[in-house]
């Protein structure tokens, strides 16, 4: 154990808590990384294990993994109510099995019957979804279009088009793009799987929709791109493995209080779990958190940085596991505006909305069914708002007789996490005014580098792929 590492583990013990903040400690590292989700955990691992850099990873929660959210039931079963599966791009499955020692398998699915209801009225919506032949035809066309643009969109925007050369298709609202290429049959699946995080995708720029469901996702549905999960079925295992490997180089339940950044390096003041104040001096800072105003408050942004990040707008996803005896076993209760009937595939619910209650399984020992709840908000809904909206919708379903009348109409929350803000996006005008170039021009300023969903696409393994390019730039001249 190095001197710096032993200090971290010393700090992590409660022994020091009684000493008080007089015991100020300074750590020196090559790279300090803030945020231990998909992008930060991976970058920390790669920098330490493959580039021989000393690192410190600062995470505000008590575990790594960000959006993953696995719930461990008393029976020993695990339920993934956040991230569902990992796309095997850029050797991701091999990385997980060989480097992290986590055996992988093809994802399995709980099969459910979809019942469409308008959650604002509780009425059933008579709706014919596209046939699988229609879906495959649309996916095939869509995958071809995505492939044309893919090299500039994945895994990073370092080769993005000049502002006046961005293809017009990508600047269309997705609804218009769909009409142009006759892709209506794609929309319900795209929305259901990952698109819904953006709200009503027909009003969102095609560029952002493609980043939320693009070539790799289309190909995974066509069977030409594989996806994986840990063989255990517990997605958190991947991040627990990162945590094991990184050991004492992670500070959990830690908060960055203030920061000094210059071309020579950075100095962070961090409050640890037991209220110790630690100073961390590093040659580079890597921020792996969503670049929102509140997240970035301790980082002393300059005008150039603020001007860029102010342009982002976001949505947020609240997910949980809920239970109530009248939620129907084996069903997905899916919210759809009545206007979608009988088959207008472009009619979708918009922010803020409960997307669905999906049957996940039955816990015999607890005598109850688990349902995955998905609520999409505009970033202002918050955890309380998410739960209230879900409860209101459930009450409506009861009142309309869509489900039986329970003894208690309360939705029981077995697990819950609010994910957001995420899906950072800007307008077509901003893109044409050089937003992407301005965003990437921030990389490396005052020894600060950036990763995470806002920098490319909201997928676990896409971010790992992006990191590999980022890291090669970050370590230059170090
Ligand atoms: C419900 C849901 C389902 C999803 N399903 C999939 C899927 O099936 N497959 C897939 O590939 N992707 C999926 N995604 C998307 C994917 O999880 C994200 O793209 C990815 O997690 C983004 O990684 P990130 O590193 O940017 O952020 P995160 O993974 O969110 O990590 C950010 C980390 O930073 C920490 N943090 C935040 N602020 C601070 C701070 N100030 N100081 C210290 N730490 C801080 C957070 O606690 C968190 O651990 C899903 C997302 C959601 C919300
Ligand atoms: C840390 O300080 C806060 C208030 O400053 C206090 O509420 C909390 O209990 C302290 N935690 C520990 C572990 O000492
Ligand atoms: C979503 O809910 C929040 C909190 O109630 C509210 O501030 C916001 O205006 C709502 N958004 C929309 C689009 O209705």
Image (tube, rainbow, N blue to C red):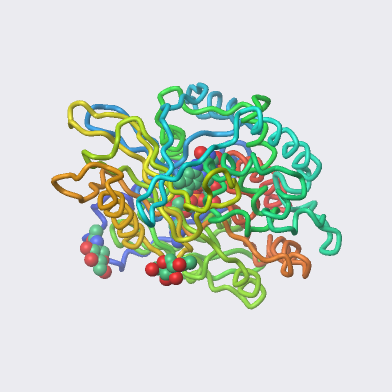
Query: Foreground residue, 163 or 174?
Result: 174
Residue found at x 72% / y 50%: 179
Query: Foreground residue, 393 or 296?
Result: 393
Look at the picture and state if 136 lies above or below 471.
Answer: above
Look at the picture and state if 117 lies above or below 359.
Answer: below
Query: Foreground residue, 457 or 22?
Result: 457
Q: How many marks on residues?
A: 0
172 left or right of 403 in image: right
Q: Residue furthest bottom?
A: 303
Q: Quadrant of the N terminus?
A: top left
Q: Residue furthest right?
A: 165
Image location (x, y in percent) of residue 98: 56, 24
Image location (x, y in percent) of residue 427: 68, 66
404 left or right of 225 in image: left
Query: Is there any visible trace of residue 4 in the rendered image?
Result: no
- Residue 82 position by quadrant: top left
Q: Residue furthest left?
A: 407
99 left or right of 59 in image: right
Image location (x, y in percent) of residue 278: 40, 61
Taking the image in four quarters, ligand 3 sits in the one at: bottom left
Image location (x, y in percent) of residue 249: 45, 45
Residue found at x 39% / y 37%: 332
Query: Is there any visible trace of residue 463 in the rendered image?
Result: yes
352 left or right of 18 in image: right
């Amino acid at each position: 154990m190095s001197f710096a590492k032993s200090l971290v583990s010393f700090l992590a013990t409660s022994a020091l808590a009684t000493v008080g903040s007089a015991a100020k400690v300074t750590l020196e590292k090559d790279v300090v990384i803030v945020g231990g989700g998909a992008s930060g955990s991976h970058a920390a691992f790669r920098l330490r294990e493959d580039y021989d850099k000393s690192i410190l990873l600062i995470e505000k929660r008590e575990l790594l993994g960000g959006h993953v959210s696995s719930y461990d039931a008393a029976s020993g079963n695990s339920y993934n109510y956040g991230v569902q599966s990992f796309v095997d791009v850029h050797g991701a499955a091999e990385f997980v099995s060989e480097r992290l020692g986590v055996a992988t398998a093809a994802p399995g699915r709980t099969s459910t019957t979809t019942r469409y209801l308008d959650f604002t009225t509780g009425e059933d919506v008579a709706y014919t979804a596209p046939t699988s032949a229609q879906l495959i035809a649309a996916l095939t066309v869509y995958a071809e279009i995505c492939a044309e643009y893919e090299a500039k969109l994945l895994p990073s925007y370092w080769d993005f088009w000049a502002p006046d050369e961005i293809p017009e298709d990508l600047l269309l609202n997705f609804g218009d793009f769909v009409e142009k290429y006759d892709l209506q049959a794609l929309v319900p699946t795209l929305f259901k799987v990952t698109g819904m995080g953006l709200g009503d995708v027909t009003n969102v720029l095609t560029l952002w929709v493609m980043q939320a469901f693009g070539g790799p996702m289309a190909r995974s549905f066509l069977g030409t791109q594989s996806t994986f999960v840990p063989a255990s079925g517990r997605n958190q295992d991947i991040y627990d493995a990162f945590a094991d490997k990184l050991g004492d180089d992670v500070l959990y339940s830690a908060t960055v209080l203030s920061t000094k950044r210059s071309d020579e390096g950075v100095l962070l003041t961090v409050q640890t779990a037991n209220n110790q104040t630690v100073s961390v001096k590093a040659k580079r800072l890597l921020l792996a958190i969503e670049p929102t105003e509140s997240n970035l408050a301790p980082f002393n942004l300059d005008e150039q940085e603020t001007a860029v990040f102010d342009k982002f707008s976001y949505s947020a996803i609240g997910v949980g596991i809920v239970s109530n005896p009248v939620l129907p076993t084996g069903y997905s209760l899916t919210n759809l505006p009545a206007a979608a009937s009988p088959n207008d595939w472009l009619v979708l619910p918009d922010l803020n909305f409960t997307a669905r209650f999906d049957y996940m399984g039955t816990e015999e020992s607890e005598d109850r069914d688990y349902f995955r709840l998905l609520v999409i908000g505009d970033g202002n809904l918050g955890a309380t708002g998410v739960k209230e909206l879900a409860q209101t919708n459930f009450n409506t379903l009861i009142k309309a007789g869509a489900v039986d009348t329970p003894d208690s109409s309360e939705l029981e929350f077995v697990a819950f996490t609010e994910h957001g803000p995420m899906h950072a996006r800007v307008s077509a005008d901003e893109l044409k005014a050089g937003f992407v170039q301005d965003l990437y021009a921030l990389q490396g300023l005052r020894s600060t580098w950036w990763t995470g969903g806002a920098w490319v696409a909201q997928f676990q393994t896409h971010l790992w792929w992006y990191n590999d390019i980022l890291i090669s730039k970050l370590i230059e001249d170090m």
